[in-house]
Image (cartoon, rainbow, N blue to C red):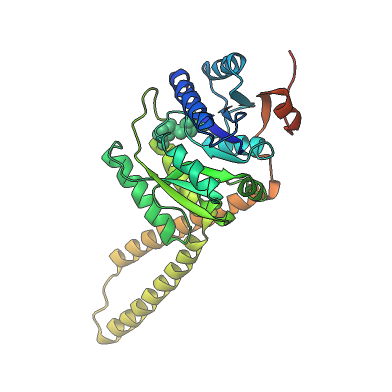
Amino acid sequence: MNRLFCVVPCYNEQEVLPETSKRLEAKVKELIASGKISSDSRVLFVNDGSKDETWNIIKKLHEENEIFQGINLSKNMGHQNALLAGLMTVKDICDAAISLDADLQDDINAIDEMVDKFNEGADIVYGVRSKRATDTFFKRFTAESFYKLINSMGGKTVYNHADYRLMSRRALLALSDFGEVNLFLRGIVPMVGFNTDVVYYERAERFAGESKYPLKKMLSFAIEGITSLSTKPIKLITSLGFFIFFISIIALIYSIAVHFYGHTEPGWTSTLVSVWAIGGLIMISLGVIGEYIGKIYLEVKSRPRFIIQDYVADDKDRAKAENIYTRDI
Ligand code: UDP
Ligand code: MG
């Protein structure tokens, strides 16, 4: 039978963890009882450098019940890296792993269907939101425009899918071959391939605590997503350059014509406007190119994407884990 891991990144989630762990435990036990997953299936919490009691709660959960495991990152590395840390830790010890958020906004009842589809042969099962009724208008609007924008730029993301998905062991192993430091998982996972399927669910509201994705983080996440999946923005700049060049030729012909017909104007306004407009365009263009050069810089250094300082789990799982920098104090 198949061993399932639920991987849950947690950043300052002390308010939700007691409830989340209860619900996940019930879900995993129910799946074990119905014979869909093996009895040594686990829930793995990844503490992403939380400043509150999150890690202590995770350690306590593990001590009280071996169904829970935890890894502790050396500092806050961000949602995507925390998720990857969890997935890479379980890739050799599970048959399938499901990633989900600590606030359980993603309906855990969809797990049954994900596991069914996995048992029927799917390697990646995407959780897709059927509606966004509980999100604010603003969040819904920004999120949906983001999906459209990223797909029009050539990225292949699954519409209305966040990071709620099941991946089989071989999909995880394939994912581990993608070495990029600029990590945008929901854009990379579709590149892995294999058999894929989709499960629909309704997204609930966060039952406690606050969103860890304020507008600023959301925007940088969007820029990260676009620039790590597509080079179209650079091509757009080239087209823009041609367009401006074309306009300048028209302006040249116009000014020569005006010169010969004797209506020459002082030309102050047009000069001023074009200086500012072209100056602005050049700055934007340099900014976009800089964004990519910054990415190349980070990739070239190939720094570790996460650093794990602790892994609390059964001895046999711990023995298989690699690159854990534990220290007894
Ligand atoms: N998260 C994380 N590291 C961060 C920010 C968020 O591990 O730096 C986790 C967080 O604990 C949660 C998930 O990522 O489990 C999604 O965050 P949140 O629910 O705040 O985002 P939203 O649902 O509002 O988009
Ligand atoms: Mg949330």
Q: Is residue 141 above or below residue 243?
A: above
Q: Is residue 134 left or right of residue 317?
A: left
The structure residue drawn at horizontal position 31% and vertical position 37%, both measured from the top left corner, is 135
The N terminus: image quadrant: top right
The answer to whether residue 12 shows anywhere in this view is no
Q: Name the residue at the front extreme.
A: 34
The C terminus: image quadrant: top right
The structure residue drawn at horizontal position 48% and vertical position 68%, both measured from the top left corner, is 238
The structure residue drawn at horizontal position 27% and vertical position 39%, both measured from the top left corner, is 133
What percent of the width, then of the height, locates residue 70?
A: 61, 25
Dividing the picture into quadrants, the one containing residue 216 is top left
Which one is nearer the viewer's eye here, 19 or 316?
Answer: 316
Ligand 2 located in image quadrant: top left
What percent of the width, then of the height, locates residue 46?
A: 57, 28
The structure residue drawn at horizontal position 73% and vertical position 23%, both measured from the top left corner, is 315
Q: Name the residue at the bottom extreme.
A: 260
Q: Is residue 79 left or right of residue 140?
A: right
Q: Is residue 65 left or right of residue 142?
A: right
Which one is nearer the viewer's eye here, 175 or 218?
Answer: 175
The answer to whether residue 289 shows anywhere in this view is yes
